[in-house]
Every structure is written in structure tokens, then in C-alpha cells.
Amino acid sequence: MRAILFGGGLALLISLLGTRVAIRLLTEHGYGQEIRDDGPTTHHTKRGTPTMGGLVIILSVVLAYFLAKLITQDGPTASALLLLFLFVGLGTVGFLDDYIKISKQRSLGLRSKAKFIGQTVIAVVFSWMAIAPMLADDRGETPASRAVSFIREVPSLTLPAVLIIIFMLVMIAGASNGVNLTDGLDGLATGASTMVFGAYTLVNIWQNNQSCVLAQGPKCYEVRDPLDLAVVAAALTGACFGFLWWNASPAKIFMGDTGSLSLGGALAGLAILTRTEFLLLILGGLFVIQTVSVILQVGYFKATGGKRMFRMAPLHHHFELKGWDEITVVIRFWIITGLCVATGLGVFYAEWVAGV
């Protein structure tokens, strides 16, 4: 448990102090954000705001995790290392995207095909390693399961290796792009991610306390390394919380794709490794809503020959164009995230109480 406190506290401190340094360095080098011309005109004032702040989040999480392990004299586990691999790997893809935007002075970075290939390679390696027998523990438990899960594994939905890897790939791509789409207003994605990662910290602690390793029973959780996953989740919570100090409106720095892709990947990774894959749809409900709004907008546009369902997608821009202040949209979307997190945790606990 001490490692969880150290991981969260150190990540918050490193992120809070490190972001201030990053703002100065990025500003000195002219690494400013380019703004879409077709977006709300109020966003044009943000042009030139330092971006790639996700680098601070990534460094904070990685440093905090290994420092916590060093302080507690406890070795890292396969599950935590896999999660960090996915987190850093997708962050690298996002960094390349951000760097191209800055160096080419345009609002679009990596071409969609190159971005997709990068995400796919990282996701497939993670998924394959997560179910690989060579990473099984003494009980034969691999970091991830080949069974689809909601709150626990559903044995009747055990899939062949190829299909479960494809399923995980879809999850990782969906979550990373969902956070990426949400990262359009000051502090929106950062605040929402903080709440969801906080929820996963609690889920992991509960799974550890009710682990089948400690006591077999119908209500125990067959999850590999839940306590160490809680350390990573706590570090992610702390890093996002510290970054939010500088990212809240008016933002002094943006996380960029470096941050949004990595955070989305970490969310999917936690869901996969904790056997709560479909629970993520509830906990991360805001990201689902944002993604669905884009899908509906594109589909409706094509089906009606150019008509729009929303004034602009993702959904937060629709409300901006309706006249809502940016800070109003952010706070109300945070409230929606809080409700989703509370509902998800309620469902998680209710399943344990019911014992079904």
C-alpha cells in the first residue's frame, strides 16, 4: 500500500513542478500549438500555447513508479511493465504527431495511415505479450485473459488468441482516440482522465484485497498483480492532477497527442489487465459520448448529402458554438464524468455484494 501512496504523491509532485519547467523550455524553443481554422474562432487566441505537455505526464508516471518500487524495495511486475510499455509506446506515436505539427507549422501531424500503423504495432505487441504463456506466474495466470470481461472474466466468451488480440486492438485504438477527441478544451481531457484513473486505483485496491491468491471463493478476483497495477493507476492519477494545475483554463500548456494517446492507451490497458473491459464503457462514459458524436456526425453527413447532426463534432464544440462559455462546457463535462465514474464504481461494488 505504501507504494501506491508514494507512486501517486511523487507523480503529482514531479508533474506539478516539471510542467512549469516544461512551459518555459517549450516556449523558448517555439513549440507552440497550431489551431484548426474550421474550429471555434475563440480558440484562435490559443495559437502558440506550448504543447507536447504529455511528455511531463509520461516522465512523471514512469519516474514515480520506479521510485516507489525503489523506496519500498519491491520489484516491478509483468502487468505493470506491460501497462507502462503501452502507455509510453502510444505516447511516442503521439509525440511524433505533435513534433510534425510543430516543425511543419500545420494543425495536422502524422498522416492517418502512419498514425494507425504506429498504434497498431504497439497495441498488438502489448496484447500478444499480455496473453503469452511465458509471462504466466506460478499459478499459470497471464497478465491478461483470453476471456472477454465486464467485471470478471466470462468463461463462456473465451476467444482464440487471434480474436482476443483483435478485440484488445479495437479497445486500445478506441480508448486512445476517445481521449484524443476529448482533448479539445482547456483541462477537459486531463480532468476527466484524473477521475477515471482514480476510479481504477480503487478498483485495483479492492481486487487486491479480495484476490483469489489470498482466499479462494466465488467472490474473489482472478487478476494478476492488482496491487502493482494500483501503483501505476495512482501515478497516472497524480500526474494528471499535477498537470491540470497548468492545463486548466486558461491553459498555459497543452498535453497534445503525446498525452492524449498515451492516457487513452493506459485506460484501455488497465481495463484489459483488470478484467473489466466493458466496465470501461461506463467509467469512461464521457470519452464514449465524444467518440459516438463524431461517428454520428460523419455518418449523418454522408447519409443526408451534407447535412449536420451537430453544429460541430466532437460534442464539446457543438455546445461552444451554441454560446456556452468554454469553462462552462468543461465543468459540465467533468460532472458527467463524475457521474459515470460513480455509476461504474457502484456497478462494480454491487456485483461483488450480489456475488453474481
Image (cartoon, rainbow, N blue to C red):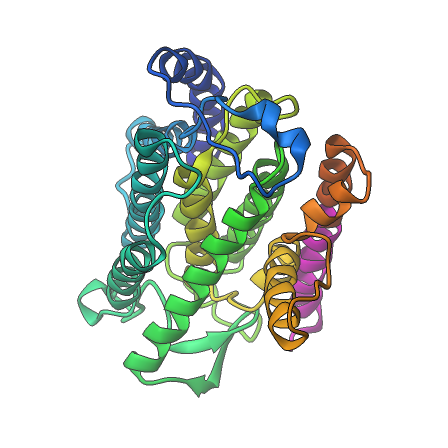
Q: Is residue 213 shown above or below 324?
A: below
Image quadrant holding the C terminus, namely bottom right
Observer able to see residue 335: no
Which residue sits furthest right? 323
Q: Is residue 217 shown above or below 10?
A: below
Query: Residue 189 appears at what percent x and percent y?
Result: 58, 41
Residue at (31% x, 68% y) in the render: 141
**59 and 343: which is toward the camera:** 59
Observer able to see residue 44: yes
Instruction: Answer left or right for 337 relative to 1.
Output: right
Residue 150 image-quadrant placement: bottom right
The answer to whether residue 355 is magenta is yes
Instruction: Answer left or right for 179 relative to 100.
Output: right
Residue 24 image-quadrant placement: top left
Query: Residue 219 appears at what percent x and percent y?
Result: 57, 70
Residue 123 image-quadrant placement: bottom left
Query: Residue 167 appears at what percent x and percent y?
Result: 41, 74
Instruction: Answer left or right for 64 relative to 288.
Output: left
Total numbered labels:
0
Magenta highlight: main SS: helix
**338 and 226: which is toward the camera:** 338
Residue at (41% x, 56% y) in the render: 269
Magenta region: 337-356
Residue at (49% x, 25% y) in the render: 12
Which residue sits furthest left? 134
**210 and 225: which is toward the camera:** 225
Residue at (28% x, 32% y) in the render: 73
Query: Residue 257 appears at what percent x and percent y?
Result: 42, 41
**24 and 68: which is toward the camera:** 24
The answer to whether residue 343 is magenta is yes
